[in-house]
Image: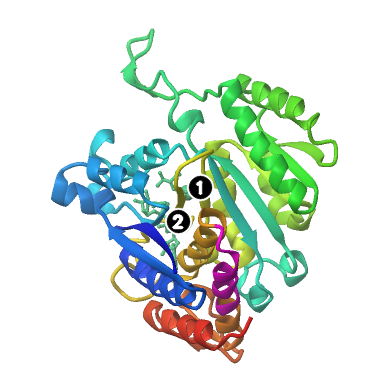
Amino acid sequence: HRSYTITLLPGDGIGPEVVSVAKDVLTLAGSLEGIKYDFKEMLIGGAALDTAGVPLPDETLSVAKESDAVLLGAIGGYKWDQNEKRLKPETGLLQLRQGLTVFANLRPATVFPQLVDASPLKKEIVEGVDIMVVRELTGGIYFGFPRGYGVNQHGERIGYNTEVYSALEVDRIAEVAFKIAQKRGGKLCSVDKANVLEASMFWRKRVLEKAKEYPDVELSHMYVDNASMQLIRYPKQFDTIVTNNIFGDILSDEASMITGSIGMLPSASLGNSGPGLFEPIHGSAPDIAGQDKANPCATVLSAAMLLRYGLGEDKAAERIDKAVEDTLNRGFRTADIYSTGTNQKLVGCKQLGEEILKSVESNVL
Ligand code: NAD
Ligand code: IPM
Ligand code: MN
């Protein structure tokens, strides 16, 4: 038996609902491949604020660092929205990403053929879309200094942040992106705002430098405003996208609507060493939390990424990917991906989870 320690961070809102499903799926798919887990459930976000007074308790970070991989649901909610920065659930997540040095956030946007009708975009546009957004995750405006509140030269009160990237930070994310593009369709589009921002001009220069090591990858550059338009106009032009922290945050939510729902998009956050962090790209969805309405697929598919990218357990990962497909084939849908007039069964988070488990159980690879 191979055995792994997995830190589970359910977090807030729908986080615990979707992590509970993903944990069961991970366990079953693992057991079919001779894998055992030691799950360590820890606090983060609002849940941690309410019990420990901070959004990322030291113990959570140390347990996460010592584990083989970390699976997170989501954090945040109305209750803590007015907190000062230091005491926001979101700050806990940012501290976790930085604490694990997971600078490369892989956010695949893949259209399942079963869900072409779930997208608000036309079938011809979304069919066959398969994009990998490589988002820089531990730098840029999220972490740059100076930042804060102050007063400007006219005596007006201001809030400010700084977009800053070092050569090392751009080089390492570019390297990850080129390697991924090489294994995929061989095309990499670097998205920036180099017509305006010095940080982007620098980014573009370093990406061009890195490109010399990857002559087999076709590199292009696009401004982020155009990219957000092109994603809707003709998403099939994209293979791999590499971009900074904030543009990647926005473009990946946008890309999720090509696939039908943000409830479908998983992610893997990786560093050069240590455990990876795996989480859906969506948030805690306070509008549907506690109602058994959340789509667990994004988290279940994140568990598959955990097996593939975090543990090198490709077979178990494949079992999960196939099970999600099979469940969709059998017509089961949560509300966010349900379309009327077809042979679909509307179910809640729990039942979709149970159907995925049945698919894992019955699937022969
Ligand atoms: P959100 O992603 O939580 O929700 C946006 C919309 O998508 C909502 O209508 C929600 O119901 C829907 N949605 C999201 N996930 C879904 C799922 N799995 N199934 C079905 N529908 C789903 O974004 P928001 O409303 O802007 O943010 C809510 C809170 O979550 C905020 O506190 C925010 O800071 C936090 N947040 C956390 C993360 C994270 O933990 N990684 C990511 C994004 C937002
Ligand atoms: C995400 C979220 C986070 C981000 C927030 C909650 C800090 O939107 O994971 O996409 O901006 O990175
Ligand atoms: Mn986001």
Element marked by disc 2: loop
Q: Which residues are magenta?
A: 312-323
- On the image, which quarter does residue 160 sit in? top left
Seen at 51% across and 40% down, the residue is: 271
Q: Is mark 1 in CB contact (under 8 Å) with mark 2?
A: yes
Q: Nearer the viewer, residue 61 or 134?
A: 61
Q: In the rendered view of the protein, which quadrant contains the C terminus?
A: bottom right
> Does 277 sit left or right of 108 as displayed?
left
Image spot of residue 41 (x, y percent)? 27, 59
Image spot of residue 258 (x, y percent)? 64, 62
Q: How many marks?
A: 2
- On the image, which quarter does residue 348 sit in? bottom left
Badge 2 density bin: few <14, some 14–19, many ≥20, Cα 10 Å: many
- On the image, which quarter does residue 176 sit in? top right
In the image, residue 47 sits, relative to residue 37, either above or below, namely above
Element marked by disc 1: strand
In the image, residue 182 sits, relative to residue 31, either above or below, namely above
Check disc 2 and report the residue beneath it.
279
Badge 1 density bin: few <14, some 14–19, many ≥20, Cα 10 Å: many
Query: Is residue 226 in view from this perspective?
Result: no
Image spot of residue 9 (x, y percent)? 32, 56
Q: Nearer the viewer, residue 18 or 360?
A: 360
Ligand 1 closer than 8 Å to the CB at disc 2?
yes
Check disc 1 and report the residue beneath it.
269
Ligand 2 closer than 8 Å to the CB at disc 1?
no
Please name the amino acid that badge 2 sits on: Glu
Q: Nearer the viewer, residue 291 or 311?
A: 311
The residues tagged by marks 1 and 2 sit, at their Cα atoms, a distance apart of: 8 Å
Determine the residue located farthest toward the bottom in the rendered image. Answer: 343
Seen at 27% across and 43% down, the residue is: 56
Determine the residue located farthest toward the front in the rendered image. Answer: 1
